[in-house]
Amino acid sequence: MAFSSNAVADHHEQLELAENQFTISNIKLQRLAHLTDYLPDLQIHSNPLDQNPFFHLVSEFYITPSDFILRHILHDLSGAFPSSEPYLEYHRAGPRKQIYFDPCHVRAAIVTCGGLCPGMNTVIRELVVGLWELYGVREIFGIRAGYRGFYSIDPVPLNPKMVHGWHRKGGTVLETSRGGFDLHKIVNAIQDRGFNQVYIIGGDGAMRGMVEIFNEIKHRKLKIAVAGIPKTVDNDVGIIDRSFGFQTAVEMAQQAISAAYTEAESAVNGIGLVKLMGRSTGHITLHATLSSRDVDCCLIPENKFYLEGKGGLFEFLDSRLKDNGHAVVVVAEGAGQDIIPRTESQVQEKDESGNPVFLDVGSWLKSEFKKWWARDHPKDLFTVKYIDPTYMIRAVPANATDNLYCTLLAHSAIHGAMAGYTGFVSGPINGNYAYIPVEEVARAKNPVNTRDHKWAWVRSITNQPDFG
Ligand SMILES: Nc1ncnc2c1ncn2[C@@H]1O[C@H](COP(=O)(O)OP(=O)(O)O)[C@@H](O)[C@H]1O
Ligand SMILES: O=P(O)(O)OC[C@H]1O[C@](O)(COP(=O)(O)O)[C@@H](O)[C@@H]1O
């Protein structure tokens, strides 16, 4: 692209102006809770990594309390949109020179909560192996069946031999569940069993529970570090770059989309319909659409759509079928929930954790498509094939990239807990690992930004109308 000399001058002028004007004066360091906040006399230990034969310590190996990561790296330097929000900085994750636990006295508990996600077993494995090999911890326990397992089932002792091949398995060997959150029973059980490090692998619901557990432990002034590792196949936890297992899920979704495409292409006026996960966000659907190139229409909860009339889904599919003879629609489970007719009891229905129970948008669309075609094209052949690969997608082991990611998350959490930090979640921010206060993670949302160029690109490759 050629610039006119005026445009070049303009460009340089604007940049210079921005460089002169821009200074970051509004930085806010995000405070991280530490056990010494309420236990000021805790003993300090030197990090056993100093003596670990597997480690080659280089200078600047240890992270210090002054190492931070800037959350927002996108800035408009023109000053046209001055931000009143502070620039948030989070503590960098990683090993600290001084730790606040004697590894011989650590009793760690690991729990998995909520729905499945590829990589849960890898995180468990890496927590066990990391605690054991990096720090020499020998008392590590798995809590079975989610939060309720703390007070209702005996913990399982874990060691590296036991968990060796767990990264090859989907799901969670520790088992998981929804509901069963009873704060006092859980904290009493943690205290009675002598756990002093608790690792919670879970989504936004589990993180809200973790906030309560952390506050109660603080209230009781217990020397127990609580660390979270965000798990959500939907990628709907905010602040962090992305959640583990998400890439695996996007990859797995391709198989369903390809099958839908083949079915649609092999029929006269064939529609392949795939429902993907995403209760409140369309990340899997958006990314699966972008990576597939076989999708004609992508429906996500962040964007409302309608069926009939100008700009409606039927009109769009009509033109696709006329042009190509087939079409593929991918819909996130949370999309269209506002337009599916439902009874009063269906409106109220919640799962054990209090999440709203959705109606099956895929089955509903399939039947609406059939009714529409029978009404508008009674003489023409028509086929809809509906695929819901939800459990196939989330019950698989993580791919190599996600497995590596799980390792880094687990090790970050271990280093943070050993260093006496508590009430934190470890997660990547701008490609670096950070410790984020769990309260923030529990309330942060991560919707697809439909003004983002990724979404615009979905529209352009699918030539999809601007619904709603
Ligand atoms: N607001 C909350 N306070 C305390 N515990 C919660 C809260 N929301 C969910 N939980 C608990 O967290 C666990 C996981 O929640 P759930 O929503 O099922 O999955 P996820 O953690 O993946 O979002 C469940 O045991 C649930 O009871
Ligand atoms: O059938 P289940 O286990 O209740 O789970 C279904 C839900 O779990 C999810 O996979 C997400 O689970 P989480 O919220 O626990 O991460 C959703 O996409 C889906 O709606």
Image: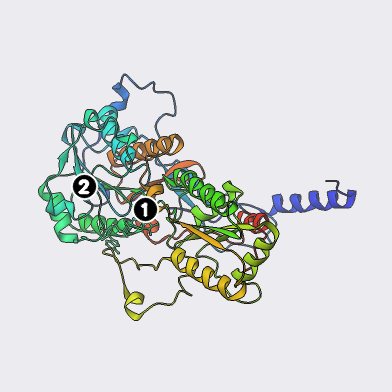
132 vs 420: above or below = above
Colour mapping used in the image: rainbow
Q: Quadrant of residue 67?
A: top left
Tell me the SS state at disc 1.
strand
The residue most toward the front is 379
Q: Who is closer to the viewer here, 45 or 118?
A: 118
88 vs 352: above or below = above
Amino acid beneath label 2: Ile
Residue 27 can be seen, yes or no? no
Q: Quadrant of ligand 1?
A: bottom left
Q: Residues within 10 Å of mark 2 (few under 14, many from 20)?
A: many
Query: Is label 1's Cβ within 8 Å of ligand 1?
Result: no
**What residue does disc 2 label?**
224
Image quarter in which the C terminus is found: bottom right
> What x and y, as percent, mark residue 258?
54, 47
Q: Who comes first in sequence, dot 2 or dot 1?
A: 2
**Disc number for residue 451:** none
> What x and y, as percent, mark residue 434?
42, 44
Q: Who is closer to the viewer here, 148 or 82?
A: 148
Q: Who is closer to the viewer here, 394 or 256?
A: 256
Tell me the SS state at disc 2.
loop
> What x and y, as percent, mark residue 113?
28, 52
Alpha carbon of mark 2 to alpha carbon of mark 1: how far?
A: 16 Å
* Residue occupying image coordinates x 59% and y 64%: 381
**Disc number for residue 437:** 1
> What x and y, as percent, mark residue 26?
54, 56
* Residue occupying image coordinates x 65% and y 61%: 321
Amino acid beneath label 1: Pro
235 vs 374: above or below = above
Left or right of 46, for residue 303: right
* Residue occupying image coordinates x 50% and y 41%: 431
